[in-house]
Image (spheres, grey):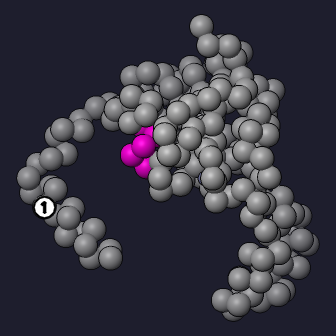
């Protein structure tokens, strides 16, 4: 599989196709998007939003969740705001998310089946990692998006001038529905 990727890449660069994507590191729309790593959104989300290369910083994780106020998603957002000129943030959850109703005990069983030692989970607890909270998904995508918007809205390092919006995108139709955040002017 990876071999195919490398071969494709050779052809891509030989044809000089990189030139078609030339842009700067500063997002043209002063926009950052936090969304899910779901493969159905890879092309669909930018296409449905009219976003081209260079337009927005897109930060992805499982579920488009902000798990920790000082975790990697917020870190990326702060860099986007203070170093790259981002003024608008969209949190975009989606329908039929793989993280919805995910069962942590089942995942732990899968890990054990792959040879992960039981002790690891005890050690994590000892070091203060709440495995359920860290690895857990959500029951309702709308609630998850609302919580992320609230977390950012009250984050001590995010300035007032940054507008924050919460949406859900339909993975079949691409329709965007606002569920939280600032009013759209
Ligand atoms: Zn998802």
Residue drawn at point x = 72 percent, y = 56 percent? 100
Residue 158 % position (x, y): 70, 25
In the rendered view, tell whether residue 164 sits above or below residue 70: above
Comparing 123 with 179, the one in front is 179
Residue 157 visible in the current orientation: no
Residue 62 on image: x %, y %: 62, 55
Residue 69 falls in image quadrant: top right
Q: Number of callouts in the render?
A: 1
Q: Nearer the viewer, residue 109 or 88?
A: 109
Q: Residue tagged by mark 1?
A: 11
Q: Is residue 179 visible?
A: yes
Splitting the image into 4 quarters, where does residue 111 fall? bottom right
The residue at the far top in this view is 185
Most foreground residue, 53 or 79: 53
Residue range highlighted in magenta: 42-46
Image quarter hosting the C terminus? top right
Residue at 58% x, 49% y is: 36
Relative to 156, is 88 on the left or the right? left
Secondary element under disc 1, as helix, strand or loop, is helix
Percent coordinates x, y for residue 134 in the rendering: 78, 60
Queried whether the magenta region covers residue 22, the answer comes back as no
Q: Residue at x 65, y 26 (%)?
A: 178
- On screen, residue 8 versus residue 121, left or right, reads left
Q: Nearer the viewer, residue 18 or 148?
A: 148
Residue farthest toward the left in the current orientation of the protein: 15
Query: For the point 25% across and 73% down, which residue is it?
Result: 4
The answer to which image quadrant residue 150 occupies is top right
Image spot of residue 182 (x, y percent) = 69, 17
Q: Neighbour class for label 1 at 10 Å: few (<14), some, many (≥20)?
A: few
């Amino acid at each position: 599989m990876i071999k195919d990727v490398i071969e494709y890449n050779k052809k891509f660069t030989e044809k000089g196709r990189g030139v078609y994507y030339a842009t700067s590191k500063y997002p043209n729309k002063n926009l950052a998007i936090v969304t899910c790593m779901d493969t159905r959104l890879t092309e669909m989300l930018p296409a449905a939003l009219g976003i081209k290369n260079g337009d927005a910083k897109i930060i992805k994780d499982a579920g488009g969740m902000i798990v920790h106020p000082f975790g990697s998603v917020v870190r990326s957002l702060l860099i986007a705001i203070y170093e790259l000129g981002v003024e608008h943030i969209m949190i975009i959850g989606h329908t039929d998310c793989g993280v919805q109703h995910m069962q942590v005990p089942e995942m732990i069983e899968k890990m054990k089946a792959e040879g992960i030692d039981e002790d690891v989970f005890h050690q994590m607890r000892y070091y203060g990692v709440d495995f359920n909270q860290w690895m857990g998904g959500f029951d309702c995508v709308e609630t998850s998006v609302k919580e992320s918007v609230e977390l950012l809205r009250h984050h001590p390092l995010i300035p007032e001038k940054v507008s924050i919006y919460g949406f859900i995108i339909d993975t079949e139709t691409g329709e965007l529905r606002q569920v939280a955040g600032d009013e759209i002017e």
